[in-house]
Image (cartoon, rainbow, N blue to C red):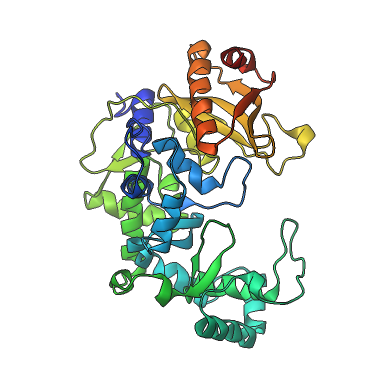
Amino acid sequence: MPHDLNTLAARRLALAAHGVVDARPTAKINRGHVRKVVDKLGLLQIDSVNVVCRSHYLPLYARLGPYDTDLLHRLASDGELVEGWIHEATFLPARYHHLFDWRRSDAKDLEVRPKTKQWVRENQDFIAKVLDRVREQGAIAASDFEEKIVKRGPWWSWGDAKMALEWLFRTGDLGAIRAGQFERKYDLMERVLPSEFADIAIPSRDEAHRTLLTMAAGHLGVATVEELGDYHRLQIGETRRHVKDLVTDGVLQQVSVQGWGTPGYVSAGWSRARKDSISTLISPFDPITWHRDRAERIFGFHYRIEIYVPKPKRVYGYYVLPFVHRNGILARVDVKNDRQDSVLRVFSSWGESHDDDPADTAAALAGELRQLAQFLGTDDIDVQNKGDLAPQLARHFT
């Protein structure tokens, strides 16, 4: 029995849904361009890693090329984007804020980890005082509180004020604001979320989940049940039930995909993607590679972030960016923005074994590295001789 989608068709459908088939704009990038990318992806994951630049800048760069990052901050400061715990810490269009009321309600009902539940129960008075201070004082950062910071984990330390602010943010009592600096400022949600979005009717949990899964199908192109749920971090049991209902209702369609041992799902009325992908470097936190099994299933690309792997055990490097080219992920580079010396350092360059034209990949990657350097404002690119693609890549910088 023939498959609905062969491997190439599935890749093209996924890349089109992820917004990396349309040529980068040639006109000056404006807010409308940034808004279009955010709408295409549905959200932007935020991460503190700043090896190249803040991670939420890179998905926009991948699709737009060099742009003014302040455009993103303006959308956030004007209330078009809000921050929430969606797919980790995330920028989200404000018009979708109401779709996650169930998650904030879960937190208020203390459907959380036992240690968090215990801390919240033991610190109700303190949490109330923090909320009162924000109500009276306005936007505030955790650093505005004077207190002894107690180490609570292996990677970072939060004091009680930070924990209270994060809890109030999680329950929706507070919203978060970020300007050019990474530190969050917290304010009452009613002062963060524009009134036209605050007044939207709150759907039931089931209604919200159905809407989110329908949106995820559009953002992914073709996906398994697990991948649909993972896009907004929904529980797998609820996801299976809702996907079945959405297929019955004609909202989603089940398809078979070559090489997949499980059904795929697409939006009703879907059509095959015909355009080839652009050539672009993507963030480790780009939706294209969020779901590691998906990246391997669709692109044959095995990917793991090695930031927390001890250096002797790293395979590819500390901060590795995948390279999308010719409808696949055909290379990866370990890079760093050396701000002190104004150099984009390429510590290693690796190709994929299934690439039938590595010379072409190296040439395209060289052009993309020059674009990235322009975006970062660096003066030079230093390609080191490590990795099977490094010799061919280095020839473009001699």
Question: Depth check: 273 or 178 in front?
Answer: 178
From this viewpoint, is residue 116 visible? Answer: no
Viewed as shown, does residue 188 lie left or right of 133? left
Viewed as shown, does residue 94 lie left or right of 340? left
Q: x%, y% of residue 314?
A: 72, 33
Question: Depth check: 65 or 241 in front?
Answer: 65
Name the residue located 68 percent from the left edge and 42 percent from the top edge. Answer: 307
Viewed as shown, does residue 205 lie left or right of 356? left
From this viewpoint, is residue 360 visible? Answer: yes
Name the residue located 54 percent from the left edge and 32 percent from the top edge. Answer: 373
Question: Depth check: 142 or 381 in front?
Answer: 381
What is the count of numbered marks?
0
Question: Depth check: 12 or 251 in front?
Answer: 12
Q: x%, y% of residue 2?
A: 29, 23
> Residue reaching furthest right?
312
Q: x%, y% of residue 183?
A: 59, 61
| Relative vertical location of residue 190 with respect to residue 75 in this rendering, above or below | below
Identify the image quadrant of the C terminus. top right
Identify the image quadrant of the N terminus. top left
Q: x%, y% of residue 76?
A: 42, 60
Q: What is the quadrant of residue 193 in the picture?
A: bottom left
